[in-house]
Each structure stands twice: as C-alpha cells, then as structure tokens.
Image (cartoon, helix red, strand yellow):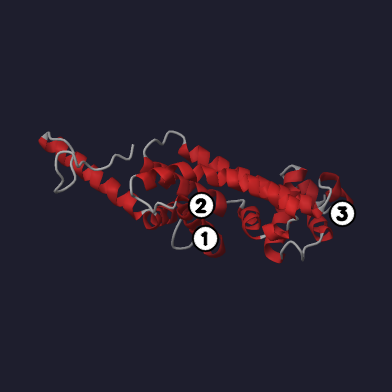
Amino acid sequence: MTKEQNNPLPRRDAILAAAASRFRRQGFERTSVREIAQAMGMTSGSIFYHFATKEELLVAIMEEGVRDIMQSVRDGLAGETRLPERLLSMVRSHLKALLGTRLDAMTVLLYEWRSLSPTAQTRVMASRDAYEALWTAPISEAAALGLVDADVVLVRQTVLGALNWTAQWYRPGGRLDIDTLAQRMYTMLFPRVVASDVQGAACASRSKAIGTPSESPGAGPSETVPSLN
C-alpha cells in the first residue's frame, strides 16, 4: 500500500499538507514537486493533475490558511457582545488556528508570500486583507473609548505581528498552553481594555451593594466608567 493510499486525508488535502510541511522546513524555492510527490508515494504528474504549477500549490496553501484562521475567529466571536470578550476571543482563536494542526500552512502563509508572482501576491493579499478587516471594528471601538492608540491600523498591525511571531517560538507541551498564552498576550496587548473592564466590574459590584449608579472612583455624577458593551 502506498503512502497516498494509507493517508486518511482526501488526496488534494494530503498534497497540501505534504507541500506545506516541505515549504515550511526547506523554503518554497528549495523544494521540488518531485520531493513532495515522493513524500506522498506519487509521481510528479499526479501532483500536476491537481495543481497546474508549484506556485498554484503555494497559493492554495495560503488561501486555505487564511480561510481556516478567519473561520476560527468568526466561530470564537459567536455570542460575544462585549468588547473585552470579543478581543480576548479573537486573540485566542487566532492562536489556536495558527499554532494548531495547520501550523505548517500558517507558517508558509506568513513567511513565503515573497515567493509569489505579483499577480498571485495580489490574490493572496486580498484574502489576508479580508481577515485583517475583522480586527478593525473592535480595535476602532477600543480607540474611540481611548483604550488603545488612535492609529487603528498601527494597533492592528502590532497585535497581529505579535500573535504571528508565536509561530517561531511556541512549542506544544511547554510552560504555556494556548489558552494561557492567549490570556497573557491579551493582557499585554490591550492593557487599558483589561483595566477598564476590571474597574467597570468593581464599580458595578459596589453600586449593586449600595444601590447607587456605577461611577469611577472620584468621578462626578456624569463621569461614569465608559461602557464596553
């Protein structure tokens, strides 16, 4: 039985996984279609039945990587309405998709885009931009509340850059699991959101206890803690 026949993944998905593994470890330019085919127990011609060129294979890996991470974040956002929970969920969902079973594909997406032709770059960057747009609304909301820098694009780039860099150093089974890592990074990346949420919860608890409106410490009647709903 060949490796291909032994593989439980559909043939196209198995090719993508094998190619992503080689591209991540050796680089796109240094990996041949023949090597990928040998890893699959296939001929090079069988690869080209599914993908016309090696670049088309790379584009498919990247586009599916973007779809995976976008779906992960959307699923994580389901049912979350408050800003702190939304941002924490986005950080957690991004890390779970990035560092999970598709780590090879995600790493290729992040670091091999320069190997693409200009036309292919435009195609892949359109998918990436659609994903990054998901982050614009919550970061803009935080900026309007004064909880992050007013330069929303810079904040988004900083957040995603920090999250994506974990692909270089994170190791499963280490001192941090992904949930703990997500909580720690959320706290570091959005400290004023965290502080405001804690302050708001404390004020709400005090007002519930004494039956008065929630106010920030020392604030006048109209200077209530900004709502994050």
Q: Which one is nearer the viewer's eye here, 123 or 171?
A: 123
What residue is at 14 percent from the left and 48 percent from the top?
A: 218
The quarter in which the C terminus is drawn is top left
Q: Are marks 3 and 2 in contact (CB under 8 Å)?
A: no
Does residue 121 lie above or below 215 as drawn?
A: below
Callout 2 amino acid: Leu
The dot on residue 44 is 3
> How many neighbours does mark 1 have within 10 angstroms: few (below 14), some (14-19), or many (20 or more)?
some
Does residue 167 lie above or below 52 as drawn?
A: below
Residue 100 % position (x, y): 56, 51
Which residue, given by chain and number where applicable, does mark 1 sit on? 166
Q: Are marks 2 and 1 in contact (CB under 8 Å)?
A: yes
What residue is at 70 percent from the left and 52 percent from the top?
A: 121
Residue 199 % position (x, y): 24, 47
The dot on residue 221 is none
What residue is at 19 percent from the left and 45 percent from the top?
A: 216
Is label 1 in a helix, a strand or a loop?
helix
Q: Which one is nearer the viewer's eye here, 157 or 6?
A: 157
Callout 3 amino acid: Ser
Does residue 32 lie above or below 71 as drawn?
A: below
> Which label's residue is closer to the chain start, 2 or 1?
2
Residue 56 % position (x, y): 78, 50
Residue 42 % position (x, y): 84, 52
Is label 2 in a helix, a strand or a loop?
helix
Label 2 – label 1 distance at C-alpha: 8 Å
> How many neighbours does mark 2 have within 10 angstroms: few (below 14), some (14-19), or many (20 or more)?
many
> How many neighbours does mark 3 have within 10 angstroms: few (below 14), some (14-19), or many (20 or more)?
some
Is label 3 in a helix, a strand or a loop?
helix
The mark lying in front, picked from 1 and 3, is: 1
Which residue, given by chain and number where applicable, does mark 2 sit on? 95
Label 3 – label 2 distance at C-alpha: 34 Å
Q: Please state if 36 lies on the left or on the right of 202 as rendered.
A: right
